[in-house]
């Protein structure tokens, strides 16, 4: 190995040992075709995109309730009643695996939060993708004292700013 490559190889090895996602990217690069028909950048980009999408889905599920819990929370007679609310855009949710998940920020302790129709109407101007909407609502923001829009809407001192930000997302 040339002398200049040795420090780089050591750095790559050290990072791969502490960062499994980085190690998977390196593995994909090593397995990538080297012929003109294979583009290394495409392989790396696809691998990175898959990892990012996986992280978004994991975060979504971790901050959500499955259909049976939403059914119990709302006192809905059946899972189909919960799914009807989703299909009518009264709730957002997404199927992940064999379960449908509903972001927890949509609920108070025993009901749909009262401002949810307005939230969904404003956020729906931006996107109808449940993963994107959840991310917009749960991303901690410096302009909301480190709270998310979903949290700030519950704080009287920050609610007006949070509504302005949510309105601006769809503009």
Image (cartoon, grey):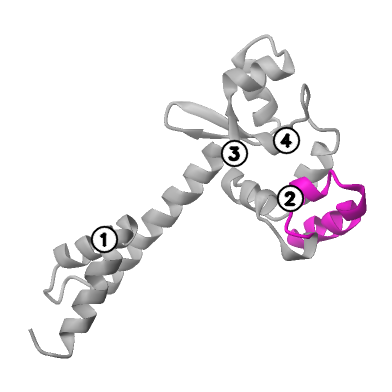
Residue bearing mark 3: 63
Residue drawn at 27 percent across, 63 percent down: 16
Task: Check disc 3 and report its element: helix, strand or loop.
Answer: loop
Name the residue that disc number 2 marks.
Answer: 123
Label 2 neighbourhood size at 10 Å, few (<14), some (14-19), many (20+)? many
Q: Residue lying furthest top in this view? A: 77
Residue behind mark 4: 106
The number of discs equals 4
Q: How far apart are marks 3 and 2 (CA)?
A: 18 Å
Q: Can residue 25 be seen in this view?
A: no
As helix, strand or loop, the secondary structure at mark 4 comes to: helix
Residue 144, relative to residue 97: is it above or below? below
Q: Which residue is drawn at 21% across and 83% down?
A: 7
Tag 2 secondary structure: helix
For residue 170, what is the image quadrant?
bottom right
Q: Is residue 130 left or right of residue 54?
A: right
């Amino acid at each position: 190995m040339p002398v200049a490559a040795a420090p780089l190889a050591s750095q790559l090895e050290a990072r791969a040992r502490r960062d499994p996602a980085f190690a998977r990217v390196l593995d994909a690069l090593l397995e990538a075709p080297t012929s003109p028909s294979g583009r290394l950048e495409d392989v790396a980009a696809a691998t990175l995109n898959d990892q990012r999408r996986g992280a978004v889905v994991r975060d979504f599920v971790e901050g959500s309730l499955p259909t049976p819990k939403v059914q119990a929370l709302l006192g809905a007679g059946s899972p189909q009643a919960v799914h009807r609310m989703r299909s009518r855009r009264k709730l957002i949710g997404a199927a992940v695996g064999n379960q449908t998940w509903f972001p927890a920020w949509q609920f108070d302790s025993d009901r749909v939060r009262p401002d949810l129709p307005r939230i969904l109407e404003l956020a729906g101007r931006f996107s109808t993708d449940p993963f994107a909407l959840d991310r917009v609502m749960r991303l901690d923001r410096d302009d909301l004292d480190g709270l998310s829009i979903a949290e700030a809407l519950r704080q009287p001192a920050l609610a007006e700013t949070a509504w302005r930000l949510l309105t601006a997302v769809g503009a």
